[in-house]
Image: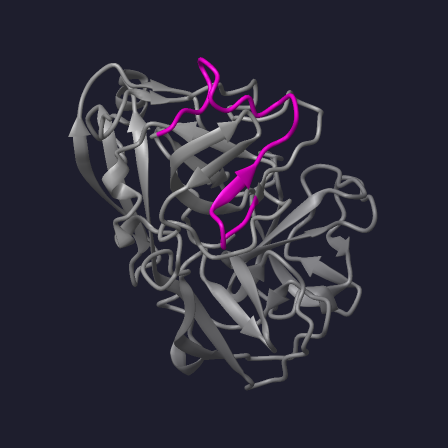
């Protein structure tokens, strides 16, 4: 029996997965105690020409950002078109697969990788999730109420956010909020205004941290060069000069000042003046997976961090302490002619292991 083959797409359907046609339901049942996997009547077709065969690998679940992947196992026998038995379960996560793995695929990935713990989905050996670490503490220079997505932390001095980057997180209570902007924030105009006025109306309690000399403009309107704010009231701001063009209700106003940070979501815990603000970054974690890489995959990944040659390739991904995704590749079997189709397809960014959104 061959130790590997050249197929990473055995009987895939239009969705790139082995299983039912699009729009129909099916599950595979797996018993950890017996190693028996039960397919769906009229769909699994195991043991038939062009379908799963003894010696192939069954990959439970789907390894992408939206799916759940349980790991790989070698098929050691097929009783009939709806029943097969796997060998070692060391490659599986240990999570319950009964009735939940609607999606699965069949591959001819090298057999020795299935019993190699470093490619297992069991987190005793592999697949550690990244964790958030507090790497910097700033201080609020004014209050921010519940429900705002802008927080008042200045860039310079004792209350700075100088080491922080877009994509890091603010820890508010027990919730993490992704940072979208440093020194910038947006808010909708609540009224329309004609040319020549110098007052913009919006609830400034939703923009804590703006002040005289903050600058404001309209997103997408090139005739609106950023204008300095000369006064801030509770429901409006006054500009240092008149508006060069009309403002409509719902226009997005861009605020620029080194005293605010904008978030992807609203905070659930109020922040007081001089309160500590913790900044976190996801680091660590790792994941390994064996991909079938075709000539198309080689071309698609060229010049990127996933660039590699054709064959069966072990890929390790992790996040470093600068929040950067790192990729290491090892060609396990160099060969051309691999036919792919299973998900994930190897391209410029095949893996699901990324910093959290």
Q: Nearer the viewer, residue 89 or 18?
A: 89
Q: Which segment did they paint magenta?
A: 30-54
- Residue 11 image offset from top left, x and y in percent: 48, 18
- Residue 92 image offset from top left, x and y in percent: 42, 51
Q: Among all residues in the image, which is located at the extreme bottom?
A: 274
Q: Residue at x 37, y 68 (%)?
A: 162
Q: Is residue 266 above or below residue 70?
A: below
Q: Tell me the quarter of the picture where residue 107 sits.
A: top left
Q: Residue at x 55, y 42 (%)?
A: 67
Q: Tell me the quarter of the picture where residue 263 sits.
A: bottom right
Report if residue 45 lies within the magenta region: yes
**From where the camera sits, is residue 155 visible?**
no
Q: Is residue 172 above or below residue 247?
A: below
Q: Nearer the viewer, residue 7 or 15?
A: 7
Specify whether 23 is left or right of 351.
Answer: right
- Residue 63 image offset from top left, x and y in percent: 46, 40
Q: Is residue 47 above or below residue 226?
A: above
Report if residue 111 lies within the magenta region: no
- Residue 7 image offset from top left, x and y in percent: 34, 20
**From where the camera sits, is residue 84 visible?**
yes
Q: Nearer the viewer, residue 324 or 340?
A: 340
- Which quadrant is home to the N terminus? top left
Q: Among all residues in the image, which is located at the extreme right?
A: 191
Specify whether 140 is left or right of 284.
Answer: right
Q: Among all residues in the image, which is located at the extreme front?
A: 79
Q: Is residue 212 above or below residue 228?
A: below
Specify whether 287 is left or right of 280.
Answer: left
Please identify the dominant SS of the magenta region: loop
Q: Tell me the quarter of the picture where residue 155 sits.
A: bottom left
Please say which color scheme the image uses: one colour
Q: Residue at x 37, y 56 (%)?
A: 127
Q: Nearer the viewer, residue 169 or 103?
A: 103
């Amino acid at each position: 029996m061959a130790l590997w083959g050249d197929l990473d797409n055995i009987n895939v359907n239009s969705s790139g997965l082995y299983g039912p046609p699009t729009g129909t339901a099916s599950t595979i049942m797996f018993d950890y105690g017996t190693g028996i996997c039960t397919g769906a009547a009229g769909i699994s077709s195991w043991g038939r020409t062009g379908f799963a065969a003894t010696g192939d690998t069954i990959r439970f679940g789907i390894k992408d950002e939206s799916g759940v992947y349980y790991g790989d196992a070698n098929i050691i026998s097929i009783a009939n078109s709806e029943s097969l038995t796997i060998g070692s379960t060391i490659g599986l996560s240990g999570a319950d697969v009964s009735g939940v793995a609607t999606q699965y695929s069949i591959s001819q990935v090298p057999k020795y990788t299935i019993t190699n713990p470093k490619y297992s989905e069991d987190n005793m050996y592999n697949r550690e999730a990244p964790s958030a670490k507090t790497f910097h503490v700033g201080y609020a220079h004014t209050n921010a109420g519940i429900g705002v997505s802008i927080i008042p932390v200045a860039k310079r001095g004792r209350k700075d956010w100088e080491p922080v980057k877009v994509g890091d997180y603010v820890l508010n209570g027990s919730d993490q909020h992704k940072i979208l902007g440093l020194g910038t924030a947006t808010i909708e105009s609540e009224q329309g205004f004609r040319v020549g006025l110098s007052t913009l109306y919006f609830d400034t309690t939703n923009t804590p941290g703006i002040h005289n000399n903050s600058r404001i403009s309209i997103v997408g309107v090139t005739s609106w060069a950023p204008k300095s704010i000369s006064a801030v009231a509770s429901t409006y701001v006054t500009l240092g000069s008149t508006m060069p063009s009309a403002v409509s209700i719902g226009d997005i106003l861009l605020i620029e000042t080194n005293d605010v940070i904008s978030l992807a979501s609203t905070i659930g815990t109020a922040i007081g003046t001089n309160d500590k603000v913790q900044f976190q970054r996801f680091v660590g974690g790792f994941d390994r997976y064996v991909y079938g890489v075709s000539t198309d995959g080689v071309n698609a990944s060229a010049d990127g961090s996933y660039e590699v040659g054709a064959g069966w390739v072990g890929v390790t991904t992790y996040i470093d302490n600068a929040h950067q995704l790192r990729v290491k590749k090892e060609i396990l079997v160099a060969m051309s002619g691999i036919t792919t189709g299973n998900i994930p397809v190897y391209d410029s960014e095949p893996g699901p292991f990324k910093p959290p959104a």
